[in-house]
Image: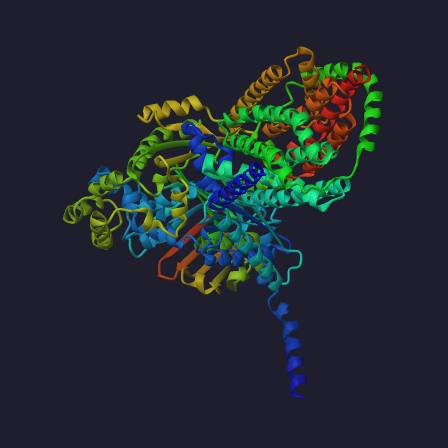
Amino acid sequence: MTNFRLLAAAALLALAAPALAAWDLAALMQDLAQHKGGRVRFVEKKYIALLEKPVVSSGEMVYTAPDRLEKRTLQPKPELLLLDRDTLTLERGKQKFVLRLADQPEAQVFVDSIRGTLAGNRALLERSYALHLSGTRERWSLSLLPSDQRIATLVSRITVGGTRNIVDTIEYLQADGDRAVMNITPIELK
Amino acid sequence: MTAARRAVALWLLALAAGLVVIARADFTADMSAFLPKNPSPQQQLLVDQLKSGALSRMLLVGIEGGDAPARAALSRALAEHMRQSGNFTAVRNGEAGTHDRDREILFRHRYLLSPAVTPERFSVDGLNRAIGDSIDLLASPAGLMLKNLLPRDPTGELMELIGALDGGSGGGGPHSLHGAWASRDGQRAILMAQLRASGADLDAQEAALARIRADFAALAAAAKIADARVLVSGSPVFATHSRDTIRSEVTRLSLLGVSGVVCLLLLVYRSFAALALGLLPVACGVVAGVAAVALGFGTVHGITVGFGTTLIGEAIDYSIYYFVQSRTGGDDGRGAWMQRFWPTIRLGVATSICGFAALLLSGFPGLAQLGLYSIAGLVSAAAVTRFVLPHLHPAGLSVRDIDGIGERLAGLARRLSVLRWGVPVLALAAAATVFAHRDVLWNAGLGGLSPIPEEAQQLDQSLRAELGAPDLRYLVVVSAAEREASLAAAERIGRELQPLVERGVIAGFESPTRFLPSAATQQARQQALPAPEELARRLPAALRDLPLRAERLQPFLDDVADARAQPLLTPEALAGSTLALAVDGLLLHGSAGWSAVLPLRTPQGTDGELQTIDGTAIRQALAAAGQSQALFVDMLEETNGLYATYLDEAILLSLAGFAVIVVVLAAALRSAARLTRVLLPLIAAVLLVVAGLALIGEKMTLLHLVGLLLTVAVGSNYTLFFDRGASAVTDAGTPQTLASLAVANCATTIGFGILAFSQVPVLRAIGITVGPGAVLALLLAAILAGRRERSP
């Protein structure tokens, strides 16, 4: 009897859930996946305990679904960050760093969170993070909590905010209390 | 009988002495046989590189089968086994964490290693710029890693060095799939490893390779991946593979050859005692040959011993002549044989010695050893046949009568003689064919001697391309008596090469000084660091417009103070890291002191094809660095050039040897007509063989040339016998002579013919020339002699 009642309750809940929230994580991911890329302007502020005031940088980003992201910083120093598949290239002045993501778990965290969010790739995100969605389709906020212990020692939370399928803020809260906030405004859509 | 006893006793003593020498001899199987006796500096470098350079220790590994995650897991597990085996100085497969030790060493020695450390960098303005740059870098994703280091390394020296570490692999390297390197198409997990044992220790390399295969088989079985397979390539694989192939082929083919000859002789002699006696000169020849090489050269090369098989072919002839030709008449027969046939055999031996003596002068130790081996072997085989065999020959022992065969052969030879006018025509046609193919007769590279199958070479190239492993074709090498001097010279050269990188003449270069600067440079960097109180005084001014307070940088002050008194970085401090790998392969301790090797990276054209490097620009840079004694080497050109030198020399020596043979024969025969009769079949046979090789598209190497020389040596015995038969007062000996020649020729053809089927190019080359050459020489000699026999 008890078993049957539990089963019925579970079935009811399962049926009711989509009805209660017509807009949910799956819907958000679907929205995000529709976004095939575009060009945005960004301003990033890093609050670092070591420093007296935040480090501010700004520039443009171009995203091409699903796995190419070009971040062109103009201030304070020109810099090009190119994320193409599994390779991260960083060009500053005459210097050029090429990182293989597999060699750099720190960089992998950064890449997976931003790539997974932009592409609406729930599976990729859930591989490394527990996801919590709040708000509405018009103004949503998605929290990514690292599930991997190694990653959690670096980043304690990533919060992505946006409207419909447009991401407009990304905040990284690091395990040591430092944080970075990036504000994004679209220039053109693809 | 006392003379007989003395001869036998002398022979036994010589044999015992020979065996003692052999027992104490050094045998080697390394590249030394292919390397020059008096090398130029470039050639010596080639030798050092091949023997113990980075190339001789680099392994490329691919894993196929299963799916991508399974391959990556196998790669990680195999790498773990390899690291723990202690057989490797480094194993890289793209796993995270393997660079930890490297990074720790770099960080600890950053002020000694970073080229950015100068007095200016630690001035107020310099510090302001460097720390400002680091803070700006915090704005970038790369800053995530830098942030924790900032209090200790605010000037960002580690970033300079890590740039060098990654830049060293040419940017990027292989891409990762599931946490391990994979080929571009993702179908193969790939690893790169450096063996601890150098190319000079093939046994250790072979054991390490066997262990990789065994470990992999166990891992694949444990993971239940049935189709998993491991592909291993690189110089160590090639070297051990060639050694194994040569060893097993020499054993197998010698056995086949010996059994073939034994069967033939049993068939002819119908007597085991005669067989044993008949093989005696050959065995003594081999002992004498190996002992002579051991005494003359100090070490005996495996390839030389391999030619023991070929000696069977000629030395066995002497005892065949003896047994068949002295068959009739018991002791009288033997005495008669010595009178009638021995002078002819003696002349044949003399001819062969002249041919092989030319090889003694070769700068190619392999050829010189072969020459000495053959001379000593043939002389002793002939001497044993002449002076010992008759005394060991029991009175009652007689071989089967094969005069019947001889009669039939004589008849055949007479009938064949109608073809005699065809011989010069055929020789001319062959000469014309050879002339028409003169540009494609010779194999231009050492490749023709390499026993590496085409398929293995392709695997090597594909793995090398996927791993971005350097091909080490272009090198700059600077040598000095001391390690420090060679490092200092490498630093000066590096400063002049840098502008060439910017101009695109070269894509980049490596240097041992990247991770092991000279002591002078390390000290200069230490001296560039200000004293702690001075640095503490400069910091506030340097930080005036930066969001960082000086008291945060106490760890920086401490580290700089430590670095000023830090012991200098030595190769020992690098042990066990990938950095040691980068240094070990590029800093060689050879016979002439220390050599720093700076491999140059070839620029790629727009189509991705590798271009060639302009040697003039490099040599100018070396001169500008004040290092005009430094060498710029194109390894490919050097190897091919080395081989071309050998080949030219060997052709010259062979021609000289042939000229001496002609002189010796002319002196012995004292007749232009007889000389022609003896030489014509030999020349025609050689021309026909060369023409045949040209027609089937087989390009000749050094060893084909040696084969031709052997053909002349063996063939001269036949033609001398025919000449003797033709000019003898009676024809009585002719059928018997013909029979002995036919048997000897069969033995030769069996011995050498079998080699033609070898997979080792060195052996195949000998077989494919001597096998047909010997038959042709006999046939042509018989055809040309027939006329004279019919009309005495």
Of residues B432 and A5, the one nearer the viewer is B432
Q: Is residue A121 visible?
A: no
Q: Is residue B356 visible?
A: yes
Of residues B88 and A180, the one nearer the viewer is B88
Residue B671 lies in quadrant? top right
In the rendered view, tell whether residue B44 sits above or below residue B394.
above
In percent of the image, x 61 and y 51: which residue is there?
Answer: A34
The figure's colour scheme reads: rainbow
Residue B498 is situated, as x and y percent measured from the top left of the image, at 37, 31
- Left or right of B457? Residue B53 is left
- Left or right of B773? Residue B668 is left
- Left or right of B472? Residue B124 is left
Residue B492 is situated, as x and y percent measured from the top left of the image, at 31, 31
Residue A66 is situated, as x and y percent measured from the top left of the image, at 58, 48
In percent of the image, x 80 and y 30: which residue is there?
Answer: B406
In the rendered view, tell whether residue B344 sits above or below residue B286.
above
- Left or right of A128? Residue B117 is left
